[in-house]
Image (tube, rainbow, N blue to C red):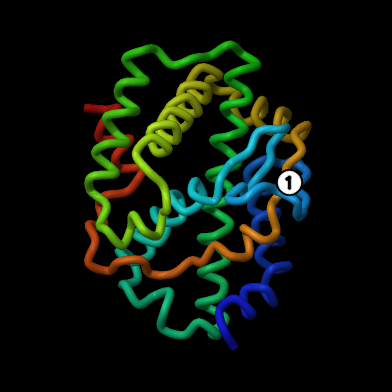
Amino acid sequence: MPYREKARSRLGRLLLAAVMSLVLLTGCGGRIYLTTGFEEGQLLQINGRYASAAELRVYLLDQIKQCQLVMGPEALEKDEDAEETRELIDRIRAKSLNQVTRVRTLNLMAIQDNIMLTNAENDLASEAAKAYYEGLSVTERDYLDTDLEALIIMFRQYALAVKTCSSIGDSFEDQYNAFLSRVDLNLNADVWNAVEAKTVDPAADPSNTFRNAYIRTFTK
């Protein structure tokens, strides 16, 4: 069966995995709805703000590289119909969706609490984005289908999410859970269904991940 048809047949289970993962992160969790009618490339709507499919692919590529490091480059390819492989793909897709949701939700909390990045922090985010982008292979850039300017925005959003989390302190999880429980999330069925989790470039630098680029830049 072609991948796209198999993806459609697994869509309900994939969405359930994403929702369950959100529940694990947030207690009661936000309300997530599978819908259509988004503009091209829009993946997720959170209280009127949109996250793109490219954002998901960036976090997904991190998960794929981690999987390759631990299990080998063939882990996602060896037997796509095997239950173990399907469960692995479901988990990394759900985890990547969680990352997009968490960062975007924390950015909403930052607006509420009037938390902003300094000029120096914005500059660091630009530096991290440039280092990450320059370390991507041609194949990886094609897979992500994004550019440096979009990555700079992502790194700034991520930095703001980290800053928001740090500013709240020990009560973060409680406050985050309470905030997310009031948030409406709409997932674009067509885009979610089309994003594949597969080995992108086995020859690419496995250490060049979004997370590593952020850590190297912001903790140096």
The residue located at (71%, 41%) in the rendering is 27
Q: In which quarter of the image is the C terminus?
A: top left
Residue topped by disc 1: 186
The residue located at (36%, 58%) in the rendering is 142
Inspect this view and state whether residue 66 appears. no
Which quadrant holds residue 190? Answer: bottom right
Residue 75 x %, y %: 39, 75
Residue type highlighted by circle 1: Asn
In this view, the residue farthest toward the front is 40
Other residues around mark 1 within 10 Å, as few (<14) / some (14–19) / many (≥20): many
The residue located at (63%, 38%) in the rendering is 50
Q: Nearer the viewer, residue 133 or 13?
A: 133
Q: Is residue 192 left or right of residue 71?
A: right
- SS of the residue at dot 1? strand
Q: Which of 89 and 147 is in front in this view?
A: 147
The residue located at (65%, 29%) in the rendering is 176
Residue 153 x %, y %: 44, 31
Q: In this view, does 11 lie above or below 181?
A: below
Q: Is residue 70 above or below residue 161?
A: below
Q: In this view, does 5 lie above or below 97?
A: below
Residue 84 x %, y %: 53, 78
Q: In this view, does 136 lie above or below 26?
A: below
Q: Is residue 208 left or right of residue 26?
A: left
Residue 45 x %, y %: 68, 41
